[in-house]
Amino acid sequence: MQPKHTNSLIKETSPYLLQHAHNPVNWEAWNPEVLKRAKTTNKPLLISIGYAACHWCHVMEHECFEDEEVAKVMNENFINIKIDREERPDIDHIYMDALQMMTGSGGWPLNIIALPDGRPYWGATYVKKEDWITVLTQLSTLYTTEPDKVITYARNMAEGIKQINLVETNTDTNSYSLEELKKCVEKWSGYFDTFLGGYKRAPKFMMPVNLDFLLHYAISQKSESILEYVNTTLNRMAYGGIFDHVDGGFSRYAVDTKWHVPHFEKMLYDNGQLISLYAKSYASTENPLYKEVTEKTIHFVTSELRNEKGAFYSSLDADSLNDFGKLEEGAYYVWKAQELKRLLKDDYPVFKDYYNINSYGLWEHENYVLIRDQSDDEIARKHHIDTIELKSRIRRSLELLSKERKKRDYPRLDDKILTSWNGLLLKGLVDAARYLENDSYLSLALENAEFILENLTKPDGSLYHNHKEGTSTINGYLEDYASVIDAFIGLYEITFDEKWLLNSKRLTDYCIDNFYDAKSSLFFFSSTQDAFVIRRTIEIADNVVPASNSIMALNLLRLSKVFQKTAYKITYQKMLKNVEPNFDDNPQNYANWLHLILLEKLPFYEIAIVGDDYKEKAQTLTKAYLPNTIITGTQKKSELPLLKNRFVAGSTHIYICQEGSCKLPLTQTKEVLTLLRANNKD
């Protein structure tokens, strides 16, 4: 059947925007022509921001945007703009700040009413149909009858949006010390849930940025309590329903304190970071659970989010059709007890105890979300079998459930390709290849990296932000450059192909030329060549993904060591200095920055390996968790300052350097590891 309604979103490539292409609302994408028309007609903007995997975005679409009565009010009184927040994070930043200023909270769908020039004067998240019609009618009347009042409010709001993003120059001559960091972490740890992991609250987000720093801190400071907290959190997350025990991969967050019931959408950015985190944690603890979680998560992203060219899609929806043909959150993932008994037969009693098909694992409507709370040894003892037999039964059961689940209606896929999220996933693959010593993961990483160079890079060497069906339309943001640079540096450290290091340097120099703000000594989120509304954002706070500026600062540190480039060092040190005043009050929002304190205050080593056996010796070093190093290597010749003129025929030498000054070379990796670990202290 021909759809009754079609709007201009039909010309877009974003799956989220295309979902709204047949709404009766006259939606348009954000573009200069639409904004110009709004000014010409003096109509206010109705800006609605969401993303494809957002459950409440779908609910509001069904209740409001598919309704002709609602559409009539919207079309008569507003220029209606639909935005995919993942395509346009620059706009999302602005209006999320506005909403938080207006209401004290935020979320999606993010609905904003703004002047024709984009300055906001009202905002809300999900709104029911009746309330939506009422408030839109009132706002339209207010704009028509009291425009001066609306304009004054919007002017003040725009000024506030600018002010909250200002970063002042820090003139304090004292640098943030290790002692201050210890006090900061001690205060922060008061919020830790040491029994269930994460923080003492619900919902629980996994926050891999925080755990990555805390792992680094625990190892470098030899803090048993912090390491125990990190391991507790990683174990509980891996045991929880937030992890898909059947086919791997993590959902976005859990709605409870025990990581049981997830908000079922699966995002590429979470899984990319968690692959990296669990791989590093495996390297530092040798806990086989962490290796298993890494492998299963990679299985998920490669089997369900990867295209034929090696790029990765964005997300899987939380909702899918249930047995009654209705969209329901989690329908694809949950199980009924009778269904499990029928499928698993004799293996059911063991499976029942292993994944808590009981009151502990019960969710709602007699549905169970699989969750563990006992070790393999405990379950094996209870059933009088050994752990090998237990693992065999559980593996067999999960394979059966995977086949059965594939008969269900599959969650909707957001198949756009985002450069920044592919960068995070690439880094995860690099770390998995490195710490699990798995060449197949390296092959996946190389294929993805080549895709970025071939399909997400413009002829002038700059990056695109997005890619869909062979088309890229949006210029890259700082997050795209930062995550790709980080991943390329990591890729160099396990391949020693200088192509990746040189591309990292080239992209870094592009950022300095096109994103750097001399006033704040930080980088803008969008290029100085691109248009902006209200302000050009400077992103410094880490969240579920690290802030683009914190990744850039760490990139600059590492590149300054490899290329011995003082300008990079001066830049990242200025960046760090201006962000330091935020650390004590909000360490959880600056965790990625805190790595820099450890890397600056503790010894940092540049490792140079030169000779015929450089790859074999490097592999012994790279599989160890050594966050305070960068490793370079070559067989004979290289123009890299650390490697130049170091070749000695007939032997492979390992140089341990600091700021380019090297000790006498060693030949045994065991000696090197002993020296590095012994010196990793204040």
Image (tube, rainbow, N blue to C red):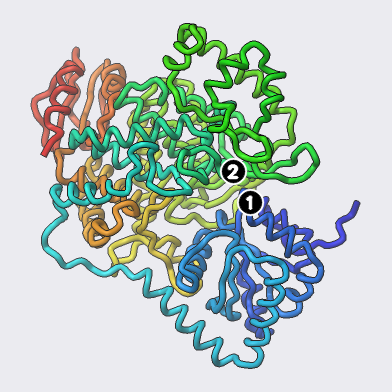
Q: Amino acid at mark 1?
A: His
Nearer the observer, 104 or 212: 104
The residue to which callout 1 is attached is 55
Which quadrant of the figure has residue 26?
A: bottom right
Q: CA distance from mark 2 to mark 1?
A: 8 Å
Nearer the observer, 270 or 651: 270
Nearer the observer, 423 or 52: 52
- For residue 82, the mark is none
Q: Is residue 611 left or right of residue 242?
A: left
Q: Amino acid at mark 2?
A: Glu
Residue at 51% x, 13% y is 391
- For residue 265, the mark is 2
Residue at 37% x, 42% y is 486
Question: Whole-percent x and y of residue 358?
Answer: 58, 28
Q: Are marks 2 and 1 in contact (CB under 8 Å)?
A: yes
User: Is residue 499 in view from this perspective?
Assistant: no
- Dot 2: within a 10 Å radius of its alpha carbon, few (fewer than 14), some, or many (20 or more) residues? many
Which of pointers 2 and 1 lies earlier in the amino acid sequence? 1
Residue at 59% x, 27% y is 357
User: Is residue 312 in view from this perspective?
Assistant: yes
